[in-house]
Image: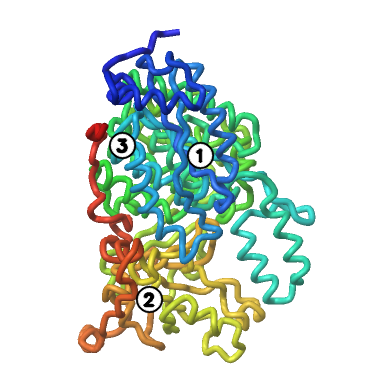
Amino acid sequence: MTDRRNSSRRSQAWFGAQGRSGMLYRSWMRNQGFGHEVFDGRPVIGIATSASELAPCNAHLTRVAEAVKRGVWQAGGLPLQFPTMATGETLMRPTAMLYRNLMAMEVEELIRANPLDGVVLLSGCDKTTPAMLMGATSVDLPAVMVTGGPMLNGKYRGQDVGSGTHVWKFEEDLKTGRMTEEECFFAEGCMARSDGHCMTMGTASTMACVAEALGMQLPGSAAWPAVDSRRMETAQAAGRRIVDMVEEELRPSRILTREAFENAIRVNAAIGGSTNAVIHLTALAGRVGVELGLDDFDRLVREVPTLVNLMPSGTYLMEDFCYAGGLPAVMAELLGGGLLHGGPVTVTGRTVAENTAPAERVDSDVITPLDAPFQPAGTGIAVLRGNLCPDGAVIKQSAASPHLLTHRGPARVFDSPEAYHAVADDPGLDVDENTVIVIRNAGPKGYPGMPEVSNVPLPAKLLKAGITDMVRVCDGRMSGTGYGTVVLHVTPEAAVGGPLALVRDGDPVVLDVPGRALRLDVDDAELARRRQEWTPPAERYVSGYTWLYTQHVEQADRGADFGFLRGGRGHEVPRDSH
């Protein structure tokens, strides 16, 4: 084994210190049973884990951390596990997105404040992955991501069911009488039947794949199920690899280049990934100083077909995706078609092209070839512009109804998601299949936190009439497990005076996805008059984190990060107070 002792390591400012300071640092660590020899200058590796029983997708990460530790010890490092907060979308109110930036701040400060030379990031639910990447990137110590893996396929009455996606389907079945309350209750246990995050191509699976596409996660590791033994093998390999990365000084700033972000955007299109990747990638790019605009997410994907046949856009689930070849097979297809950059370096120390060379597509129904794709090029995320969204909005074409991608209909406006839900089951609600449901005040500042509420269920009377989709427009987000013709991230949001605040019932709304347009057919003079009448909503928060959030959060087109967190702050060792 290579001698990895090095007195100049960052951790040695603590453990190699002389006199009282060094004695304090070492002696208190030794109460855990460490011998003096582990403070000899070997790499100290932090294992940041968001394990929490309040975040079911992350609950098993303590076991994953044990596998990482084995790898660190094998490679001659000293592993030290530490907890971070967990932003689980399933339980947190008002939305986990409100706390993504707080988690990123916590991760950043914990890494910087402690005697670490590198870090392994253990995440599960969808906000934990970008939060950890954002925090680690701002410190810029060697880092590798290990996501916790998807659940096993859900099984209900002989069919595969997907977490999240089938929540929406079962809700519709319940409202239309196709499913009873008892059947729905039973189905809950069939849908989420193992450790892990959502096994659809929701945001958790998307961000795991995006982390791998960026080069921050070991090849193939995004897709192994949480309970597969190879998930632990991957974690152990990451523990070994981070020690080498410290030796090589392979930092996120070397990996997260403009080309790496372009690869991630194209991969997201090919896998039918979540619209939430737009916000998270934009925020991450801001941390590393890469210029990434909303229009990049439209321009870069126009030539990229959807290759992966997974819910919510398709049929299969992440377990099938894994066995079909996983993300390396998708990236190999894209690279062969000239749609990826092969040169960016990754956490392996090798390039994208080198990592994907051995990849094999095993099942062409799950991962389709580039010349016979699941959906043609141009069916990924589209970025819309117009007088209703001057700074942009997005729509996931692969999850939308083709006949609604060009649509004109009257608005039915609701000032909050709750206002809509209060009347959604009213048989007298004044809507039909042509109506455009507008939900506002669900943006970063307005809700606050930009919740996943945009794909509100259709009115019960339309569901019972056999209507399965209608256009919905919102300044909030949609779960990556969701589907439907839903325009998201309308920017600027209504709460800061965006045009969505000016829409009134009956106003004609025009959606033209092929033309990349979303507009209100109301003349400029009338809109100007309405703006004069508009007053901003009263500030609801005067203290605490939520006040900080509402005062400093940026709009969706800039990633909904805090402006004061853009850029990096490095890893300077704090002053010794002893």
**How many residues crowd around disc 3 within 10 Å: few (fewer than 14), some, or many (20 or more)?**
many
Residue at position x 53%, y 44% from top? 51
Residue at the bottom extreme? 428
Q: Nearer the viewer, mark 2 or mark 3?
A: 3
- Amino acid on which the number 1 mark rests in the picture: Thr
In the picture, the disc for residue 173 is: none
Residue at position x 39%, y 8% from top? 3
Q: CA distance from mark 2 to mark 3?
A: 49 Å
Relative horizontal placement of residue 159, taking residue 367 as reference (left or right): right
Sequence-first disc among 2 and 3: 3
Percent across and percent down for residue 170 are 67, 66
Relative horizontal placement of residue 213, taking residue 125 as reference (left or right): left
Along the viewing direction, whichever of 418 and 62 lies nearer the viewer: 62
- Amino acid on which the number 2 mark rests in the picture: Val
Residue at position x 60%, y 41% from top? 60
Sequence-first disc among 3 and 1: 3
SS type, badge 2: strand
Residue 543 visible, this angle? yes
Percent across and percent down for residue 357 are 47, 24
In the picture, the disc for residue 510 is: 2
In the picture, the disc for residue 147 is: 1
Residue designated by label 3: 112
